[in-house]
Image: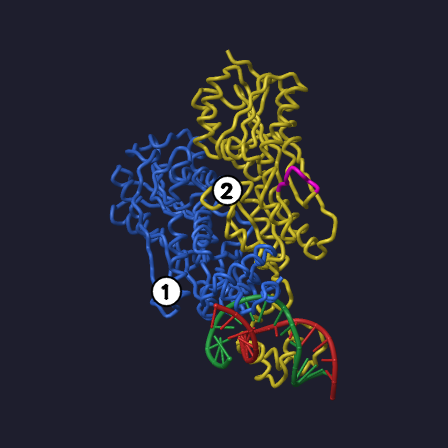
Chain colours: A yellow, B blue, C red, D green
Amino acid sequence: MNIGEIAKRAGVSRSTVSYALTGKRPVSEETRRRIQAVIDELGYRPNASARALKEGRTRTIGLVIPPAGQRLTDMQLGFVASVVDAAARADLDVLLSPSGGEHDRSFERVVSGRRVDGVILMEIRLEDDRVARLLDSGVPFVGIGHTRHPEEMSWVDVDYDTLIAKCVHHLADLGHRHVALVNRSAELVAAGYGPGHRAQAGFDRAVAERGLHGVRVCCADDVQAGQTCLQQLLAAHPELTAIATINEAAVAGLYRGLAEAGLSVPRDFSIAGVAARHWAESVHPPLTAADVPADEMGARAVELLIQRIADPATPHRHLLLAPPVSLRSTTGPARPRP
Amino acid sequence: MNIGEIAKRAGVSRSTVSYALTGKRPVSEETRRRIQAVIDELGYRPNASARALKEGRTRTIGLVIPPAGQRLTDMQLGFVASVVDAAARADLDVLLSPSGGEHDRSFERVVSGRRVDGVILMEIRLEDDRVARLLDSGVPFVGIGHTRHPEEMSWVDVDYDTLIAKCVHHLADLGHRHVALVNRSAELVAAGYGPGHRAQAGFDRAVAERGLHGVRVCCADDVQAGQTCLQQLLAAHPELTAIATINEAAVAGLYRGLAEAGLSVPRDFSIAGVAARHWAESVHPPLTAADVPADEMGARAVELLIQRIADPATPHRHLLLAPPVSLRSTTGPARPRP
DNA sequence: TTGTAGGCGTTATCAC
DNA sequence: GTGATAACGCCTACAA
């Protein structure tokens, strides 16, 4: 079923059918109706590949996510959902590429096969090969996250530095003097994962400003790791009374570890974090946290990308979000441990 | 950058370049090397649209997921992750279509624009317009879930009927006489959501076989709803001592509701469910549940789809999984309530 | 071993 | 207001 078949049955030329479909040239009411009738009858739809080949665009965007097999955090899922949603609203399809590091065939296909008009890249490292590859290829792209060189690309990101500092200040205001930062996994941080590094920077700065005792630890992204992490933290630093964290996935483990140690939150111990709002609200107890508007960020990234696709020469744009800390049930006045 | 440019620079014809790339015709070592050098220098990749147009296939599969905006359950996320993963392993790209019911443009594009070679469909209803649409269009597809007419399509599914019955029998074995089924949301069940109906059937049957008192309720897919649901359940049926459920997302709410009512699990109250293994293990307390191998199911669906794409005339295949119930921490001997 | 040429289904530029 | 026709970039008979 192709446009020629429709043309034949409607007794017109292929171009007329094409113009009737796109509306890029006036077509008499009479023929338009006849054409539409045939189309409805046969259920014809233009072939996307042929159209893409001719028009030079695919009406598809690529979304590069962390490699499958590893569970996404709630925040990452929020990004994905909102990107897909925003794209659908703009009548764009989304091609998913689970891409790790080096020789990733899926990523390579997306970037260099003209399969997509643009790309949204998640989980960016400070030095990121994929960014280099995208810059080199000339495919328009937008990051959710950015590299060590913010000016080289367009992005939306969370201001982890500022937010973790806000958390620490909040804890200091409550009288906490011994505070730990629970970061993402050691591998991620070692690999130059931006949020991990920026969180450290913000933590160090705030700790210094307030003259606190700060401890920094990394923790894998799961409940079990969070629980173990907390045990080790309490063993090594019994004077701790509070934690600041960007590790959503470990928080439930921190809660369990505290319960296990007989510490009640927030009476004996406080936790403040950076997390997706939806998640911070629904976890139990609800987490005092800087509420990252993950749902909004994906939509923003799509907007930026659509602009770049329309005009690749447009200057890069950057959106650094620092939402306020929402007080919930996990922070309270410091109560020094015996 | 196209194949003609490469050919010109390498001093050969376009077909030679094409054959050098696909290996479908012998090419002398000498010319192959020259061609490869040019390709490497210019970073050439065949245009996916042109190739798809010529070959009549896109090397892409569509994955139809529940509409964005609504959170996916852990099990659904497991399906998505494993489909994406399995597809990547087979060098297939995945086009995501968040599709609700009726006039969904995204779904329509995927189905009828020849954008994909096949489709995997999630969250199928007993009567599902999308299935009808796919059958009508002739696009190969595989369901994760199935309709009222199992023979009309290929699918992999969870045997909720059997599994919920197993849960009820397990509870009955422990002496529970008053058991409730916590189903998915009322809207979903009213809309003819298969798992909801099959769970009810299995529940009713097992309850009858064991001569128990059974109560069936629906519950929205979130923690808050689970908590409310439990409150109402206890208020209306104070004699209840156990719950069987397929509602993963509500379980945390059930836990909270029980804690709130001063009931300890599993001493005072038992819960058995059907859930993704990973999730059942990591929730606290770990849930006694029939462990749905979500990760495996997505891979199986992709296998089935690849077969159907290769030979659309092949008979339909069905995979109904009924994994054993894993004993964890949420079921114990019945202790009649005062 | 290599080259020539036709066609996949569309859009868009000419003509009429 | 409509029709012929040339691309878009690739693959693949058919020839040489």
Q: Residue at x 43, y 63 (%)?
A: B141
Residue A72, horizontal then vertical, whole percent? 50, 42
Give the CA separation, mark 1 to mark 2. 35 Å
What is the chief secondary structure element of the magenta stretch? loop
Task: Chain letter for mark 1, please.
Answer: B
Is any atom of residue B130 visible in this view? no
Residue B126, horizontal then vertical, whole percent? 41, 60
Type of residue at label 2?
Answer: Leu
Boundaries of the magenta span: A145-151
Asked if residue A147 lies in the magenta stretch, the reply is yes
Disc 2: which residue = A72
Asked if residue B320 lies in the magenta stretch, the reply is no
| Labels 1, 2: front one | 2
Disc 1: which residue = B149
Do the residues indicated by labels 1 and 2 lie within the same chain of the protein? no
Residue A46 sits above or below residue A13 on the image: above
Type of residue at label 1?
Answer: His
The reply to whether dot 1 and dot 2 touch (C-beta < 8 Å) is no
Question: In the displayed structure, does residue A262 sit left or right of residue A31?
Answer: left
State the residue in front, B13 or B313: B13
Task: Chain letter for mark 2, please.
Answer: A
Residue D10, horizontal then vertical, whole percent? 54, 66
